[in-house]
Amino acid sequence: MLFSGSVIFKISHLNAMILSSKILFYLGVFLFYFDIALRKRLTFYQNFGLSKTVLILISFLLDTLITVLFIKFIRLF
């Protein structure tokens, strides 16, 4: 019984590590977005009236949803 508890702790710790690394990655992308040359090249999202913050937030939420579904799928096996 002690072993199963440690496995659950390791899985939950892994989930927190994955999600925190994604947060750090998206924070890095957000900070990298301040580059003027990159902003000039990425004008497609501006045609739809999306700000840079909303675009990164939407991609983070979709990526988090996919990650959570993937983790739950792995736990089935």
Image (spheres, rainbow, N blue to C red):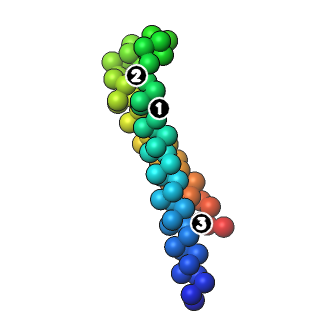
The disc, 2 or 3, on the residue closer to the chain's N-terminal end is 2
In the rendered structure, which amino acid carries the disc numbered 1? Val
- Kindly check if marks 2 and 1 are in contact, taking CB atoms under 8 A apart as contact: no
Residue 35 image-quadrant placement: top left
Local SS, label 3: helix
Whether residue 16 sits left or right of residue 7 in the image: it is left
Distance Cα–Cα, label 2 vs label 3: 39 Å
Q: Which mark is residue 59?
A: none
Residue 43 image-quadrant placement: top left
Structural crowding at the residue carrying mark 2, measured as other residues with C-alpha within 10 Å and reported as few (<14), some (14–19) or many (≥20): few
Q: Circle 3 sits on which residue? A: 75
Local SS, label 1: helix
- Kindly check if marks 1 and 3 are in contact, taking CB atoms under 8 A apart as contact: no
The disc, 2 or 1, on the residue closer to the chain's N-terminal end is 1
Q: Circle 1 sits on which residue? A: 29
* Residue 44 sits above or below residue 52 on the image: above
Local SS, label 2: loop
User: 66 and 18: which one is in front?
Assistant: 18
* Residue 72 sits above or below residue 19 on the image: below
Residue sitting at x 58%, y 75% = 7
Structural crowding at the residue carrying mark 3, measured as other residues with C-alpha within 10 Å and reported as few (<14), some (14–19) or many (≥20): few
Q: Nearer the viewer, mark 2 or mark 3?
A: 2
Would you say residue 44 is visible in this rendering?
no
In the rendered structure, which amino acid carries the disc numbered 2? Phe
In the rendered structure, which amino acid carries the disc numbered 3? Arg
Distance Cα–Cα, label 2 vs label 1: 9 Å
Q: Circle 2 sits on which residue? A: 34
